[in-house]
Amino acid sequence: MAQTMKWGQAYSVLLDVGAIANAFTLDQSELDDPNTVLDGSTNFIDATEYVLSVSIRRGRQSQVDNMSVGICQATFDDRASGRLFDPANTASTYYAGDFDLSPRRNFKVLAGTAELFVGKITDLDIQYEMPNLSFASITAADGLYELSRTTLAAFDPTQQLTSARVTAILDRTEVAYSTALRDIETGVATCGTVAYADNTNVLQALQSVAIAEDGRLFANRKNEIAFDQRISSTFSTAVANFGGTAVLSVPITAISVGYGQETLFNRVSVAVDGFGTAQVVTDATSQGKFGVQTFSLDNVPLVSQAAGSALAVNILAKYKEPEFRFDEISTSLNAAGTAIYSTLLTLDVGSIVSVTKNYATGLPLSRSENVFIEQISHNITPQDHRITFGLGQANVVSFFILDTSQLDDTLFGLG
């Protein structure tokens, strides 16, 4: 059953061990019982009482990287469980061949009812410490891993928006990713009609579409394949505040600043798939100050050279100057009040948050930024639940107000 930790949050680690939970049984089940089905379905068992620690990591290092496969690792006290997790124990009720705890089974970590991670088991390892200690380590991966191990059959796509291309790939019979596990925003870029070859890796194909959009392609905390449209200016507001003075501000236990050339590019080259010449845009002022810093993209599945040029312009506008930015923050549920748990635990990749840092000396004495969450890490032990967020720059603008806003003020935009 769920375990409530000393800071007041309840957690559950759930395993699909293949047990048939609600099968219709002849001469026992009622014909009109909605809780039984003809073949039954598998049910999750709650293994929380044996958990020693859980770690989760999803997202990417920076906004110019592809999203990594989300990974969860959980360690269990297998001796306390009576070797339930040990695949060598034929007496276990989870034994493969009976209820079947094995790779490819579903795996969930919940905080209350909020999903922190949903995926499938990839590894189940046992460590024996003599004379009779044993620990089980389960590694699970999200939907990106599943897509990375699938290939396309050759097909000729139609001209379509990037979001429609993502849907078309996920709909392919050789992929067949659940329609219930998708969260696809409408894209702004259009993909072309260059054919996909046999054995094209599905994840790489989807990541190429995300590059064409300059958006995000990731598996969210519910294991939905999420596609976010082009990352540029947004009218969205921060859904949480870190380090501020408001009652519901999230306390920061650690914060770091990035101010380097890892996202400094003043020459952007985009080669569109099916066209010979790359589209190149530059910023002479930035090159004069920092030298030439090139960012190149090849075989981008866009519809035209003009679309490639537009993508290059969008990338250049964001990265032509080095940005002083908060690039990572950490917090602790032990340090946070219970009133903000529901907000904190449901933050995901792509969420906009406000970060404030106060200083004892120098000027200014306070700095606040709106940033995107690009990476999330959870480390949960009996002592604490620590969360680290990797951050990316966000250009949050307000609606332009006639006779009030300035025409050349980049803080305002038209809806």
Image: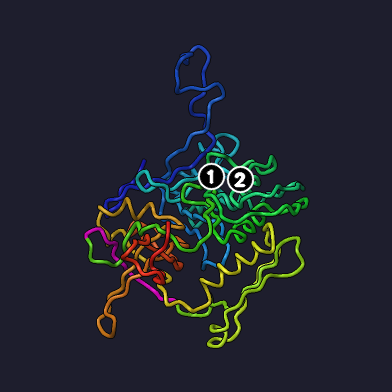
Residue found at the very far front of the displayed protein: 403
Q: Residues within 10 Å of mark 2 (few under 14, many from 20)?
A: some
Looking at the image, is mark 1 or mark 2 nearer the viewer? 2
Q: Is residue 180 visible?
A: yes
Find the magenta span and give its range: 247-258
Residue assigned mark 1? 182
Front-most of residues 365 and 308: 308
User: Pointer 1 and pointer 2: residues touching (CB < 8 Å)?
Assistant: yes
Q: Position of residue 228 (x, y in %)?
A: 52, 54
- The answer to which of marks 1 and 2 sits earlier in the sequence is 2
Q: Position of residue 241 (x, y in %)?
A: 31, 62
Q: Quadrant of the C terminus?
A: bottom left
Label count reads: 2
Q: Position of residue 265 (x, y in %)?
A: 57, 77
Q: Amino acid at mark 1?
A: Arg
Q: Which structural element holds mark 1?
A: strand
Q: Residues within 10 Å of mark 1 (few under 14, many from 20)?
A: some
* Residue at 41% across, 50% down: 51
Residue assigned mark 2? 167
* Residue at 42% across, 57% down: 351
User: Quick check: is 254 in the magenta stretch?
Assistant: yes
Q: How is the image coloured?
A: rainbow
Q: Position of residue 403 (x, y in %)?
A: 32, 64
